[in-house]
Image (tube, rainbow, N blue to C red):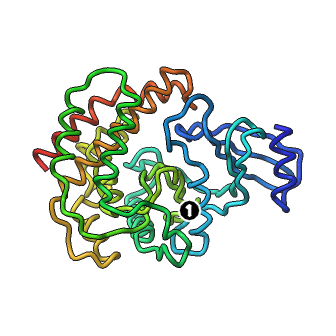
Amino acid sequence: MRAVEDWLTANVPSFRGPLSATKFPWGQSNPTFRLESPSGRYVLRRKPMGTLLKSAHAVDREFRVQRALQDTAVPVARMFALCEDDAVIGSMFYVMEHVEGRNFDDPRVPEVEREERAAIYDSYNRSLAAIHTVDVEAVGLADFGRPGNYYARQIDRWTKQYRSSQTEDLQAMEELIAWVSGNQPPDDGLLTLVHGDYRMDNMLFAPDRPDCVAVLDWELSTLGHPYADLAAVLMQWRLPTGPRGRGLEGVDREALGIPSDDAFVERYCERTGTPGIDRFNFYIAFSFFRMTAIIQGVKKRGLDGNASNPERAAQVGAVVPMYAQRGLDAAHHG
């Protein structure tokens, strides 16, 4: 901890020690810590230890995109400093402000009443539209992603990532890889900033109002196709409720004030000026494919002893077959 304290003293003008740290239970991919000091609270996010997959755990990209979004309509934490010297704590890390807010792990948001829940979901929608309407050239992110067909590149990338972390043969995933590879929509030229893991549990909402105050976990952000983020939201809603899926399957959404899929998409389209979306089943299937590859990586890190939270890694890894099968269901039935 002394190494971090010395580094903060040298790189964050407002910082004053001494320093203490507590690990957050979240931050499965990149370990995340609350730092306490006389000058205030901070958050440190680092790469995990051990052998990592190529291009994974990109905390430098997280730092860059959040710093670029500081003065936009996208709610993000203030970035203080990035450390690219592995010698300090053994891996790259960055330090950002500690944002006070509520984190909802269950999309049913049982902590609040119906009216506030509806407003939280509207803020959820508004923040996504804000991400997709950022002027990437104006904020210095015009080079934040590669040119060319986003889905072709993503399917290639996540197939390779899945193969790199594969621990057993899974027929549903093999069929899903084949389907998304063979059913890509024509490239429509849409290119925006995308978050890459846009879920309610990756957001903080104000303690006293239903507004999002910080979108977190930008590790997978890039320039890409906005419907990937939108479909990822609806993908999660198709999963079982509770800690296994953290979804909305079987939930009476109207009773809870949670929008239907169609209502959420319609409001998003209004906010982004989108006339409508065709073949949405592809985007849902793609989201399941991509998430299957991601959680397979979490499972492999857990088996290798490199997971930030080994118990959570085992829980996540257990649902890999379910995600692959849900992806196939979306592909064939919408």
Q: Which of 19/59 is in front?
A: 59
Residue 312 horizontal/vertical position (percent): 49, 29
Q: Report the residue at 37% width, 36% height from top.
A: 242
Query: In the rendered view of the protein, which quadrant contains the N terminus?
Result: top right
Decide if residue 326 is in sight here. Answer: yes
Up the image or down, 199 lies above or below 275; here it is above
Position of residue 266 in the picture relative to residue 68 (left or right): left
Residue 225 horizontal/vertical position (percent): 33, 62
Decide if residue 258 is in sight here. Answer: no
Residue 152 horizontal/vertical position (percent): 28, 53
Query: Which amino acid type is marked by label 1?
Result: Val
Position of residue 193 in the picture relative to residue 24 (left or right): left
Q: Report the residue at 50% width, 27% height from top.
A: 301
Locate residue 192: give its quadrant.
bottom left
Q: Report the residue at 81% width, 58% height from top.
A: 12
Residue 52 horizontal/vertical position (percent): 54, 34
Crowding around mark 1 (Cα neighbors within 10 Å: few <14, some 14 to 19, many 20+) is many
Up the image or down, 161 lies above or below 334; here it is above
Q: Which residue is mark 1?
A: 65
Position of residue 117 in the picture relative to residue 75 (left or right): left
Up the image or down, 150 lies above or below 307; here it is below
- Quick one: SS at disc 1? helix
Locate residue 297: give its quadrant.
top left
Up the image or down, 20 lies above or below 39; here it is above
Q: Report the residue at 20% width, 72% height from top.
A: 276
Q: How many marks?
A: 1
Locate residue 166: give its quadrant.
top left
